[in-house]
Amino acid sequence: MKSSTRTFLTAALAATLGGAVLSLPQQALANPQPRPQDAAAAGHDKNSSEAAARLDKKQYHDVKVTVDNGIATLTGTVDLYEYKADAEKRVRKAKGVTAVRNLIEVGGPSVPDQQLQAKLREKLTYDRVGYGNTFNAISLTVENGVVTVGGHARTDVDKDSALALVATYPGVKDVVGEIEVDPASIMDDETRMQVARAVYGYPTLSKYSIDPAKPIRISVQNGNVELYGTVDSQSDKDVAFLRANGVSGVFSVKNYLQVAGQTTEAQR
């Protein structure tokens, strides 16, 4: 009796184990493990969705973003260059994004280069009036709607203000920022003020302080002075150079002042 019971139990256990073994392939097929490429695709879609969520504003309704291996590619159109730049900043903050390829095109109005340059120069001349803009000498050129902004700014705030002004103007297709910020220095700040007093304190040059958009602009880098702007005569240009060069502590003066109606080289 005991022997037959053991035989029965052994047979039952064998049958159970055999069934389990036979069922393994079916279970594996019913619950397949995720493949690496499937996981990568899921991550790609998730990162793209997170990046797209950062562009959930009406100015980006024509912009598309895809993320592949951490690189986000932006395509489509916007109305202003500032939207193109801002879209890139937003997407850079998205999870999983390590770099951005910005292929967005700026639509909006098409403005002739010469007209656009004249308008932007007018805007820049009055930018930061009352905040020492006499010490900013910012230049710009326009080619096919691409604006290159260069020259010197006294502070990072002055630089950012100029770039923001250009970026928000209709007709600007792209912005190349080449503005140099003058070194932060107490000595240079004192030199700026002394040169300004020497130049504007001279009777024939005081008129250039009346219109805040047309001053003699003074840039200082480590004791080296540069003069920019437009004056009425060669005499005014020469006097400005002599007055600046006579300030104690000035190492050198480069005179980039232009005489109205003329184009001249810098006087060293």
Image (cartoon, rainbow, N blue to C red):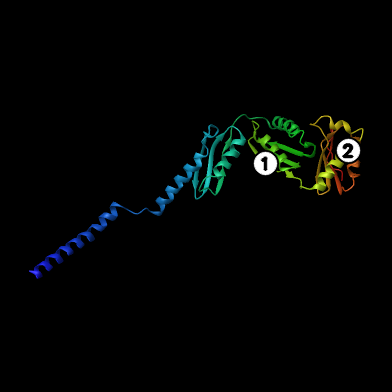
Q: Indicate left or right for 263 with 18 as reference.
A: right
User: In terms of depth relative to the viewer, which is nearer, 139 or 152?
Assistant: 152
Residue at figure coordinates x 21%, y 62% from the top left: 17
Residue ranking furthest to the left: 1
Q: Secondary structure at mark 2?
A: helix
Picture coordinates of residue 262 (x, y %)? 84, 34
Vertical position of residue 118 compared to residue 251: above or below:
above
Q: Which mark is residue 117?
A: none
Q: Which mark is residue 176?
A: 1
Q: Are marks 1 and 2 in contact (CB under 8 Å)?
A: no
**Residue under label 2:** 199
Q: Residues within 10 Å of mark 2 (few under 14, many from 20)?
A: many
Q: Indicate left or right for 33 with 203 as reference.
A: left
Q: Indicate left or right for 241 with 97 as reference.
A: right
User: In terms of depth relative to the viewer, which is nearer, 19 or 267?
Assistant: 19
* Image quadrant occupied by the N terminus: bottom left
User: In terms of depth relative to the viewer, which is nearer, 195 or 266?
Assistant: 195
Foreground tag (1 vs 2):
2
Residue ranking furthest to the bottom: 3
Q: Residues within 10 Å of mark 1 (few under 14, many from 20)?
A: few
Of callouts 1 and 2, the N-terminal one: 1
Residue at figure coordinates x 72%, y 37% from the top left: 141
Residue at figure coordinates x 84%, y 44% from the top left: 190
Residue at figure coordinates x 89%, y 44% from the top left: 245
